[in-house]
Amino acid sequence: MAVQPGSVTTRLRVLDDGAWISVDDHREVRVSELWRLDAPDFCGCDLADLVVENFQEVGVDGSRVEVRVYGQCIECGASGITGWLPVGRVRADEFVEFDRSCVRRERRE
Amino acid sequence: MPTDVENWKSEVYGNEIRDHLFEFAERGFDSIPDDERDAWFERFKWWGLYHQRNGQEGYFMMRIGTPNGVLEPGQLRVVGEIADEYARGPGTNPIFGDAYADFTTRQSIQLHWIELSDVPAIFEKLEANGLSTQQACGDSWRNIVGNPVAGKDGQEVIDAWPVIRELNETFKGDDDHSNLPRKWKVSVTGSADGSGQGDINDLAFEPAYKEVEDEDVVGFNVRVGGGLARNEPRFARDIDVWVPPERVPDVAGGLSALFRDNGDREDRYNARIKFLVDEWGPEEVCETLQAEYVDFELETAGRDVREEYTYNTGEGERNDLVGVHDQKDGTNFVGLNVLVGRMGAADVLDLADLADEYGSGEVRLSQRQNVIVTDVPDDALDEFLAEPLLEHYSPDPSPFMRGSVACTGTEFCSLSIVETKNRQVRFARWLKGNVELPEGVEEFHIHLSGCTASCAQPQIADVSLRGMKTRKDGEPVEALDVGLGGGLGDDPGFARWVTQRVPADEIPGAIASLIDSFAGEREEGESFRAFVARHDDEELDAFVDPEETDYEDPMMHNTKRTWYPYAEEDGLDDAPPVPADD
Ligand code: HEM
Ligand code: SF4
Ligand SMILES: [Zn+2]
């Protein structure tokens, strides 16, 4: 998909069967990370401890790049697909990934 | 809306990719326009090139499709020479060294660290020797699998090798079938042992007898929609069709066209034909095939021989093709165990010499990642078996060596969660040294896959291991989910995932405790699979008692955050540059 945060066009894609997120033809976000999530709809934990197994979708909200992932909370064992989670920002044509150790908060509709 | 991948495929796909590939190879990696890299890497797969993971930019895995795992005399040497010359990269594997070939669970060969600039020379050499990477990856007919010793096997019902060869010649490079919604995996088996593993393929032809004009004719029953990937494992479904051998290309082409026209091109996760069979049911698949894709009357299914299946069944005879077996012509085939399917280039070359010296020079690959030397006469057998190379690639290995299958994992694969091949070697060595199987149990299959794509076919093993993470003392570590009791056969079953997220270094202890319980509570002569079947998940979970032992695992950290797990300086910041175009 191509989206336009600000004036530059950014190409965002899920590739290789959900293995990674491509931003402008560069591999930027990968599976096999552990993310701390504030996502009460995903599981009952205060903060889910999510193994990122598969990217499902990528999108953008303003300049913020968001993904939906398939994964498992290793705290409680719940698995499934999350809502939209922020992963980084496109700034002046550059993708900057959010610190992976910070809590990621699911977008509330 | 069609996906990006579909859009790229509709622009350039299939045979025509080759010219572009060669042009990029000539002009250098950097000549791929910056904003077309994703598109070209997706397309290169069709010609067997898969960009390796993050941190290994500019290096490719190259898959050579060897139909039915058959390597004709001389071809194994070519593979060994190519591995030796080109499959060398900046990383050295501590167990396997610098140049090696991987024999895969679909009877193909994978080489790593291939540079784009070397592709034309490699293709030239492969093709001059009757080998090819065409359609080895990508959305089309993949390497056709079957019983690797087709045409030779003493247990054969019908020789499937001419059928496979014809399918391969027809559907490799056929523009009508080159752009499918997703991969298309076909299995054709002619033996009664089930070694073609049809049940886990998109399309399976299995031997069956049909009465045609008062005569019992041997042909194939057809099953559609098997596959293991993505937590959605399916066995292929019986569509109640029998075909005589000469009609196999028509029916296979009809089903491939049915998939081409009806598969989901808007959602790659829903694209495999297994999902279409879920949606339609086998009857509608059959009716549509008859109405729109073949121009003759289909026969209903014939009498199959599934009851006789033994391969990967977890009980009975011949669960694999390792060891010495009779051929129809009075000579022998000798299955050699290749631990996790990986063989150093020098060993590949040595084996090619041995195959020449003792057999016909031909070698075949099985779906358990092993190699088979064929056509060894009785009087050459003893000498062959005494060759030093066979101490390592044994025809009579420990059950833990023999039963090991592992995928690529974090060493090269983007999708992986954990390290796999080297870990499985460590597991097998530890188990061999520390664990006894109960009396009479000669095979014990442990399959390790780095993620749910299930390349190592974990769901059809005695013990299935699948990449996960957990925390140990608060620190994230590589872990594995443990499944038990899967297997093929007349009544195939997937492993049940009974224990989740076991830290990888506690797996050997967990398997030891499991085997202990099996030995203690086993009924007379009972197979492991039967033992699992009569216990519920909770009981089984209790048998799996993870604990640290003297097994040591040096790869407990996030091996995916390295550029190469075994490098001295392994950080992504230390990743090598894209290789120079020399
Ligand atoms: C660079 C390394 C590799 C990558 C990136 C890769 C990628 C994938 C992906 C994405 C899938 C899931 C596709 C689906 O939805 O079916 C898959 C499945 C599979 N691959 Fe691989 N793979 C790699 C290596 C291998 C190896 C080494 C083998 C064989 C030893 C292999 C054989 C298979 C098999 C048997 C499946 C299961 C498909 C099924 O039955 O549904 N792949 N691979
Ligand atoms: S199972 Fe997963 S980790 Fe293993 S090779 Fe396949 S895609 Fe990669
Ligand atoms: Zn949770």
Image (spheres, helix red, strand yellow):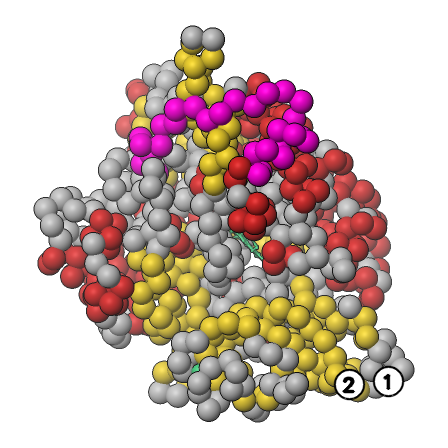
* Chain ID, mark 2: A
**Residue linked to disc 1:** A6
Quick check: marks 1 and 2 in contact, CB under 8 Å?
A: yes
Q: Position of residue B359 (x, y in %)?
A: 42, 25
Residue B287 colored magenta? Answer: yes
- Residue ID at (62%, 47%): B183
**Residue linked to disc 2:** A63
A33 over B487 or under it: above or below: below
Q: Amino acid at mark 1?
A: Gly
Secondary-structure class at tag 2: loop
Seen from the viewer's position, the closer of residues A59 and B336 is A59
Q: Are marks 1 and 2 on the same chain?
A: yes
Q: Amino acid at mark 2?
A: Ser
| Residue B488 visible in rendering | yes
Residue range of the region highlighted in magenta in the rendering: B284-312
Instruction: Tell me: A23 left or right of B84.
Output: right
